[in-house]
Image (tube, helix red, strand yellow):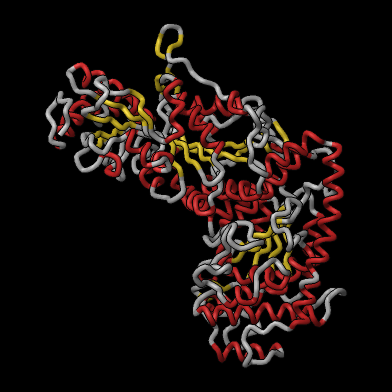
Amino acid sequence: MTAHPDWWDDLDTKAVDTARLLAADAVEKAGSGHPGTAMSLAPLAYLLYQRVMRLDPTDPEWVGRDRFIMSNGHSSLTQYCQLFLGGFGLRLSDIESLRQWESLTPGHPEYHHTAGVEITTGPLGQGVANGVGMAMAARRERGLFDPDTASGESPFDHYIYVVAGDGCMEEGVASEASSLAGHQQLGNLILFYDDNHISIEDDTAVAFSEDVLARYEAYGWHVQRVDSGEDVTALEAAVDKAKAERDKPSIIAIRTIIGWPAPDKQNTGEAHGSALGDAEIAATKKILGFDPDVKFYVDPAVLEHTRALVDRSREAHAEWQQAYDAWAKDNPDGFALHERMKARALPDGWSSAIPSWDVEKNGKPNAVSTRKASGEILTALAPVLPELWGGSADLAGSNNTTMEGEPSFVPSDHQTKNYSGGPYGRTLHFGIREHAMGAIMNGITAHGGTRVYGGTFLVFSDYMRPPVRLAALMKLPAIYVWTHDSIGLGGDGPTHQPIEHLASLRAIPGLDVVRPADPNETAACWKATLEKTDGPVAFAFSRQNLAALDPAKTVEAYRGAYVLEEASSGRADVILIPTGSEVGLALKARETLEAEGTSTRVVSMPCWEWFEAQPMSYQQEILPPEIKARVSVEAAVAMGWRQWVGEAGTSISIEHFGASAEGDVLFEQFGFTPDRVVAAAHAAQQHAGLTTGSTTGN
């Protein structure tokens, strides 16, 4: 069924058909790609870009814009064609260069690569969860700056539009996030479900038969169905109804025919993920009234028509700016905060709020778990950094992620006895949805403005790996608060004791993995993390208490590695390189080694990545190349440590799963003791050709 609204004319039809054929030609030239969905979703995409969304092609980063996410990112041409037609900066040559080296049109949309792309998508379902995060960020931002203005009348009101396909609906991350979105009553989120029944394995009936809208209705969403993706009138009416629903997120299921109107390949798996072929494209062009022999044809009249969006958008932008300026005049403090948050700048003197811990308390060593120290730091920073917010995947009491006294981010009718708050609160409750939490955090961060953290046990970072990897790829400054970092957590046993996780996370390019040794290193590392805006940071915090170190020394933790205790002779025979809770073991081992005449340096290394970023001169100052005898100490697999201990060095590690017992028992049973560190230091010296107690080196 084809139906058009009153404003539609022949140039609109031709623009939609142009987009369909550009997609087909682009994939054909590239030799790979996904033409079908871009062809069948062209009417929806055109409607959104030309009539529905508040955007400015001349200012793609405008804070007042609506956000658009192509969750089924393999259909990137759905978006690229509209960015080209709408005047966002893409040229026809960019469409022709789909999937090529240094092209602005990569195979999947990439954040900060193509103007108008809000977030990197491709792994299916992620974009749905990203959209939930953006909607949450928009609501939090409105609560910070303009909570009392009527709905729809604030310069901070905008919509998040997400397009998703059958594959996204099948992925668990979309289900997790959609469940939370319904619970959160995110009326600023509109999801379009391209219900085309086709995936790579052709008809989705082989694997997917549920009633998606019934599921979303159970989640608490406003649901609608449009029977034909060609019915622009029905599409526009559905969008209007969705925007009128203020208290629920909306899903609009649209029945499309993938690859329409290709005569032989529409509604087939071939149209999903492969070039249609010259003959099929030529036949499609004939059907649409285009010259079958001309590739990448764009009628100048069509381009003039679609790029009128630039002028219309300028008018909308100017109207918004008037409202924003009026708000700023009435709210100078809010305006200053908004400007600071846009720039991800920190206020003067902010770090003075970060607490420190004395080495002794009441005449005894002051021992605090790093998870507890982290929680105290967050509480202390709450009044200083209003942009900082976060929570946990139902482990707040274990992760210490709740800023004391701060209200929950939750609809008023979902408050509980223990967690009161409202729609503009600060404490996030992700529920037991680690995968969605990670992807939602990416959406919050990509939205801009606020700074979010999310917590769970380190072992459950496995559930979060896809969005963590994407955060690193996009260089999003998300913060992961992962606790219970080793066998030291004790009785929960091997299912909860991370062994391989530090190594596998360190393998992700661009992810900084930080394992502090005590509360004061935790403070220094939180400071460094909040000053970092070009990538994610993953904390690995202890459950067990750790003795506080000298804060005058731990201030150097931001370098990633530093000399915590120097060799007594001034020139070390051996260097011990521990992280986290094992720093205390190394310090005790040093006492023994020094007493027997082995000059020993202890280098605390909370973050490999930060250390690698230091100048080589600093790295060699901390780990002098001539000192070959080195011992790393970390309650995890040793993978990767050879980089730091060298060929002559050795690693004290755990190369098997843990067990259920108290943490101190497990450390003893699995060899994490000062005596074993001493023995390893001797072995490293022998391997390096040294003799125990020597101070001359080799």
Please state which of residues 158 and 601 is positioned toward the viewer in this rendering.
601
Residue 380 can be seen in this image: yes
| Residue depicted at 66% across the width and 43% down the height | 343
Establish if 283 lies above or below 243.
below
Q: Quadrant of the N terminus?
A: bottom right
Question: How many discs mark residues in the rendered view?
Answer: 0
Establish if 193 lies above or below 516.
below
Q: Position of residue 138 (x, y in %)?
A: 71, 46
Please state which of residues 564 and 76 is positioned toward the viewer in this rendering.
564
Establish if 221 lies above or below 17.
above
Figure quadrant of residue 287: bottom right
Residue 255 can be seen in this image: no
Residue 266 appears left or right of 638:
right
Q: Quadrant of the C terminus?
A: top left
Residue 550 appears left or right of 196:
left
Q: Position of residue 152 (x, y in %)?
A: 83, 49
